[in-house]
Amino acid sequence: MGKVIVGGVIEKDGKFLLVQEAKEKCRGKWNIPAGHLKTNESIIDGAKREVQEETGCDIELTGILQIGNIVLKDDIIITVIFSTKLLKENIKYDKNEILDVKWFTYEELLNMKDELREYNWIINSISTLIENKVADIDLVKIIYL
């Protein structure tokens, strides 16, 4: 039927906040805080919720870093990753979902090919932010029916 994954890149002092996955299929891999959109949830609300659930941080979405389309044999996945403004850093997380939350420099991430869940997806999102190629958040239009 298709899934939508939303999340956000959090930057502070030249470092980026990633989460270490606890799920068996990707256990120990580092990832952007992100997850599945819930039924009747906007991509804006879902991204804020996922970041808060996985990191404990309060954020404001500021732009669009990447929209992706993963085509599988029997399914599709759409991903929307936002740039954020960190409003409140309060690191806390569910240890059943997340093993750790940690700040990394871009240079460290470039050298973590085997440790990142989806290397190109993560690096492309962060590169877009670093290169100031962020799309305007106003491109997102929410329609409630």
Image (cartoon, rainbow, N blue to C red):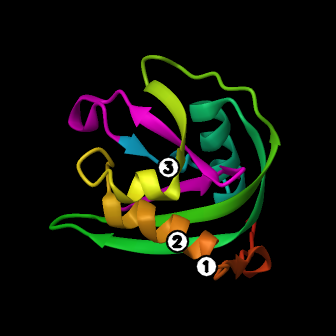
Q: Which residues are magenta?
A: 1-29
Q: Residue furthest left?
A: 73
Check disc 2 and report the residue beneath it: 127
Q: N-terminal of the two: label 1 or label 3?
A: 3
Image coordinates for residue 52, horizontal then vertical, percent: 67, 36
Residue 7 vs residue 68: left or right? right
* Residue 129 seen in the figure: yes
Amino acid type at mark 3: Ile
Q: Is residue 16 magenta?
A: yes
Check disc 3 and report the residue beneath it: 32
Image coordinates for residue 120, horizontal then vertical, percent: 34, 67
* Residue 1 seen in the figure: no
Image coordinates for residue 18, horizontal then vertical, percent: 51, 42
Check disc 1 and report the residue beneath it: 131
Labels 1 and 3 touching (C-beta < 8 A): no
Q: CA distance from mark 2 to mark 3?
A: 13 Å
10 Å crowding of disc 2: few (<14), some (14-19), many (20+): some
Q: Secondary structure at mark 3?
A: loop
Out of 123 and 8, give the one closest to the viewer.
123
Amino acid type at mark 1: Glu
Q: CA distance from mark 1 to mark 3?
A: 18 Å
Residue 117 vs residue 49: left or right? left
Q: CA distance from mark 1 to mark 2?
A: 6 Å
Out of 23 and 128, give the one closest to the viewer.
128
Labels 2 and 3 touching (C-beta < 8 A): no
Q: Residue furthest top?
A: 95
Labels 1 and 2 touching (C-beta < 8 A): yes
Q: N-terminal of the two: label 2 or label 3?
A: 3
